[in-house]
Image (tube, rainbow, N blue to C red):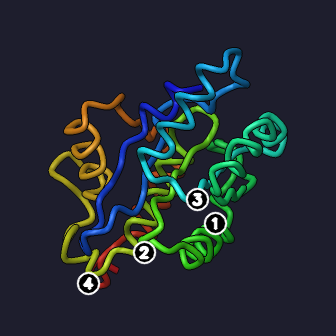
Amino acid sequence: MSKFYREACVFPRTDGLTGLAVSARRIPMPAKHERDVRRSRDKLRELRVSRIVAICGLEDATSLEHHHALYEELGIAWHFFPMEDTEDEPVPATLLPWLLTVYGQHDPASGIILLHCMSGVNRSMLAAALLLWHTTPAAAELWPSTNTHDGEHVLIAWMDEHNRAQRKSPYMLTNTRFRRYIADTCRPTNDA
C-alpha cells in the first residue's frame, strides 16, 4: 500500500500552489501489515493530500472500499468516476465537466488532489492533463504548441519531463483514443 503513495508525482501550478499528484502505481490492495497502513498514512500527510479522485471501472470500485476508513480518518474527500481504459469507447463527455466540478470544490490551500486509476496509466494521466490544461492560468502561454518535434502533445511531454525530474516511474499514456482526446481538448485557441 505505501509504495503506491511513495510513487506519486506532484505537478506544480503556475500560481505557486501545488495542485495535483498522480500515482504511477497500481491501486493498493488491502494492507497486510499495520506498518503498511502507517506508512501510507504518513505519506498522504506528507503530500498534504486533501482530495482523492479515482477513475476506474465499476467492478474495480468495490476493491477501493477498504480505503475509505483511512481517508476518512485523515479528513480526505474521495471521489469516483466510472470509466474503463479501452480503445473501443470514446472518452465520456461528462469526464471533463465532472473533473472541473470536483476541482472547483477543492481549496488548493488545504492540500493537493491525488489522481489514480487501477494501473497508474492512461486514465490518471488523462485526468491530470485535462485538469492541468483547464485550470492553469494562461495554459496556452505555458504550453503554446499542441505538439513537440516528435508529435507528442507538449503538455504530456512536460508532464513526463517533470516526472523524470522527480525520479519517479515513467508515466505511460498508451491509449491512443485518450491521446487524441487530449490533443483535441487541450489546445490553444489559435490552434483550433
Give the Cα separation between the discs numbered 4 and 2: 16 Å
**Residue positioned most to the bottom:** 189
Counting other residues with Cα less than 10 Å from the Cα at mark 2, is it few (<14), some (14-19), or many (20 or more)? Answer: some
Residue position for label 4: 190
Q: Viewer-nearest of labels 4 and 1?
A: 1
Secondary structure beneath label 3: strand
Inspect the image, locate mark 2, and give the three-letter code of the amino acid beneath it: His
Counting other residues with Cα less than 10 Å from the Cα at mark 1, is it few (<14), some (14-19), or many (20 or more)? Answer: some
Which disc, if any, is residue 118? none
Secondary structure beneath label 4: helix
**CB contact under 8 Å: marks 4 and 2:** no
Residue position for label 3: 51
Along the viewing direction, whichever of 134 and 86 lies nearer the viewer: 134
Q: Residue 161's spot in the image, x, y percent?
A: 22, 43
Quadrant of res 160: top left
Mark 2 and mark 1 lie on one chain; the one further toward the N terminus is 1
